[in-house]
Amino acid sequence: MSFRVQIDQFVGPLDLMLHLIREQQMSIFDFDIDVLTDQYLAYINEMEDLQLEIESEYLVELATLIEYKSKKLLPKEETILDGEYEADPKERLIQRLLEYQQYKEITEQLSDFYHQRNLQMAKPISMEVDHWIKKDDSTLPIDGNAYDLVKAMYKVLRRMKLSKPIETKFTQKEISVDDRILQLKARLKDLDETFTFETLLEDCNENLHLAIVTFLAVLDLSRLQILTFFVDSNETIWFKRG
Amino acid sequence: MEYKEYKYGIEVTRPLHINTVKKVERKDEYPIDTIVEGLLFIVGDEGLKIEQCAAVMDVTLKGMEEVFSRLMFKYQKEEYAFELVNYGGNYKFLSKSYIHPFASKLFQTTKTNALSQSALETLAIVAYRQPITRVEIEELRGVGCDMMLRKLQARNLIQEMGRSDAPGKPFLYGVTEEFMDSFKLISLDELPELPDFSSDENENLFE
Amino acid sequence: MEYKEYKYGIEVTRPLHINTVKKVERKDEYPIDTIVEGLLFIVGDEGLKIEQCAAVMDVTLKGMEEVFSRLMFKYQKEEYAFELVNYGGNYKFLSKSYIHPFASKLFQTTKTNALSQSALETLAIVAYRQPITRVEIEELRGVGCDMMLRKLQARNLIQEMGRSDAPGKPFLYGVTEEFMDSFKLISLDELPELPDFSSDENENLFE
């Protein structure tokens, strides 16, 4: 058996049938339902042997195929039940395959449109808009949906991505201890009377070098008695101004 | 807002001018095209609808349409890095695709989100057959698509459009404006024609 | 992305051209000024630093400066609805002030979500990352959000959920039931997955 194709290559049983018909070089209009059923069954068995999970939909269609096949064996007259003519099951299958094929084919073009659109980017709405939007009226119900949140989060992430490389590549090049002392002195004004070492590391963005430089700078500031420090029982380093 | 606008007639064939008399005793004249460009710039990916814009500029829809088509034509030129598009009736500026490689470098990502084959098939069926129920989609695809429909809904590509009269009153699905934007369509009429496989002759499926 | 770039010399005095050789056997030349305009357009209010842009375009800082000054000069002209400004080494396009009365009118008449973009972004961060502290939110948004958090709390969209173990024991924030109602969510698990910026691989949104 030469079914080297994986089942996840197919998006459903109809897709698999189209593949099998094509592989047998049969026409979609007069394929042999026996051959198709056997091939289909063999394919499912192969998957089972490989212990791949087969979704129930494949089994449902297999049952349908077998049913078609068995009905074919019955004499024609018996398919007329209660005076109602039942459409030839193969005709129905052909109709389904044809219709499915149409949508399958068109996805190629749609996928292409989608790709082209992905190459184009929009500008985020300007922040100045916030001034013009009517003042938040907290009584107004919010008519949001989850996608609004994704879009907003997407913008946040994109912005972060944009600002990160500058931080790391350009501005965060080796800062000297002396420069760091100046930076810290400037920040001290905005800090509480006592604060922790972690507070001082907030602008380090996990840059180890900068953290070490900060530590050296703090040691110097303590030496100059601009800061005093103590360590609490949780081993947190606390600083107090001058 | 205390500025006065000049009312235009119905026929607008070339750039018009707007008189803005602002509180600040400024009195300038700016072409309507330029002002609309400015608005399009400000709203960014939100885009503008023709009605909205016509109301703000106090011109007729027809007049507004002409402004937009002039702008669309203008921005097609190579010298502009972005173009004016109309997807689903929403006008917006989008960067041209030749900017993309540089943008990828800037954002340090080469990724463009792709849609899976299942997602595309489901979308195609909804787009061509809307309004359509889940069961009808499943019949066409031969696969259950409960999860897929929810994912597409979460992604705002499809939406519920009321309920069918069929037993159980199932939801009917249709595509959204976001879908139109994602697939570069002005309206559903622009969807490519479905291939016709109804006769043996057209069947070059087996190449 | 397989494109090749042309390396420039140090002196850049007039518009240069970039060779992009894309997979699709296209081979176009675009002036560097145009590409930078495109990038400036895409980043919007965030703006671009000269170093960043020079790295992306693979030109020297001096060359980049010249591009920016050419562009600043170009967009001063009245015919452009926006101008290029340089705030502290950050270059960005801003709409010109004569557009503002119209923009104001547009947003007064536009039905909005009743939430500003910054409110929406803050909510999104809380929803995706809860429980989260104010400092963590500010790191993500890049701006202070003390006021915003208080506003959202007053609107009952977010709530305090205890305190973090971090130094100073800051409050942790999470979303409320009211939030879930407003965004039609049953649980936070329903939030659509985010596009992944960290991976370089092409990735399917839906498997």
Image: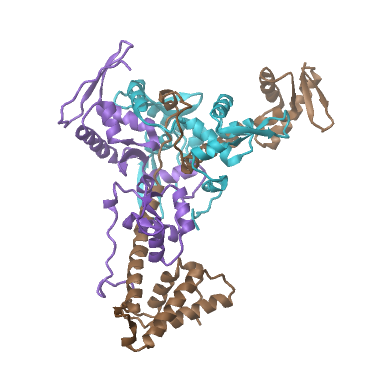
Chain colours: A brown, B purple, C cyan
Q: Is residue B102 above or below residue C143?
A: below
Residue A9 visible to the viewer: yes
Residue at image x 25%, y 39%?
A: B73
Q: Residue furthest top?
A: B25
Q: Is residue C93 above or below residue C124?
A: above
Residue at image x 83%, y 28%?
A: A231
Q: Quadrant of residue C67?
A: top left
Question: Which x, y percent locates residue C126?
Answer: 58, 37
Question: Which x, y percent locates residue A209?
Answer: 70, 35
Question: Which x, y percent locates residue C44?
Answer: 44, 33
Q: Would residue C158 be found to the left or right of residue A241 on screen? A: left
Q: Residue furthest front?
A: A82
Residue B207 visible to the viewer: no
Q: Is residue C70 above or below residue B127?
A: above
Q: Would residue B34 be found to the left or right of residue A61 on screen? A: left
B54, A114: nearer the viewer? B54
Q: Is residue A226 above or below residue A94?
A: above
C192, B46: nearer the viewer? C192
Question: Which x, y percent locates residue C204?
Answer: 49, 55
Residue at image x 32%, y 70%?
A: A98
B55, A198: nearer the viewer? B55
Q: Quadrant of residue B139?
A: bottom left
Residue at image x 41%, y 85%?
A: A70
Counting the numbered discs, the total is: 0
Q: Quadrant of residue C99?
A: top left
B141, C71: nearer the viewer? B141
Q: Residue furthest right?
A: A233
